[in-house]
Amino acid sequence: MVEKELPSSILSCKTSYKFSLRDKKTGEVRTFIMGPGLAELLHGVERLGSLRQAAAAMKMSYSKAWTHVRRAEQICGAKLTRPAAGGEGGGGSQLTEEGQWLLDTYDAFVKEADEQVKQLMERYFTRDLPFS
């Protein structure tokens, strides 16, 4: 049998991370709090200054986006967005300090985790493979 190296061009991995919270007192794991969908929504609020526009950019209804954010706020026990002062076009939304922290922390984790996964893929899948 001829051993071949897997071409690096096919080394790719799509990762997705979701987080839950654990209650420090009871040890109970609370419902999912942060994942790629909420991160995309919060990035949209950050970029567009509006939950409605962020939802539209994701092809999501405003009511679904609003429910998603409010549910996360209930689980976190902190507001993630706040109303922004209205102008000619009306008001909008901004991330709170807690919302920005959650988004920044999630992004940093995903970046580092993806780098580790890439290193593991290279370690395990760029050596000679026993099949042709």
Image: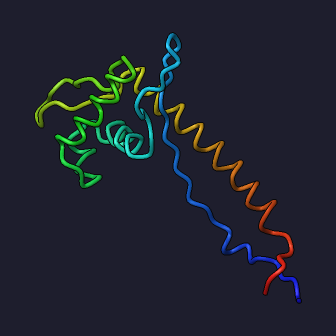
Quarter in which the C terminus is drawn? bottom right
Estimate the x, y position of residue 125 in percent, counting from the top left: 77, 67
Q: What residue sits 18% from the left and 43% below the top?
A: 62
Using the rendered view, name the quadrant where residue 74 is placed: top left
Image: 67 above or below 73: below
**How many circles with numbers are drawn on the protein?**
0
- Point 29% across, 52% down: residue: 58
Point out residue 39 in the picture as x, y percentages from the top left corner: 42, 41
Residue 107 is left or right of residue 89, and the answer is right
Report whether 79 appears left or right of 23: left
Residue 53 % position (x, y): 23, 45
Q: Nearer the viewer, residue 61 or 30?
A: 30
Residue found 47% across the figure and 28% down from its top: 102
Quarter of the figure with the N terminus = bottom right
* Nearest the eye: 8 or 44: 8
Q: Residue furthest top?
A: 25
Name the quadrant containing residue 8: bottom right
Q: Position of residue 43 (x, y in %)?
A: 39, 41
As drawn, is 131 to the left or to the right of 13? right
Q: Residue at x 53, y 14 (%)?
A: 24
Of residues 44 and 62, which is closer to you in this image?
Answer: 62
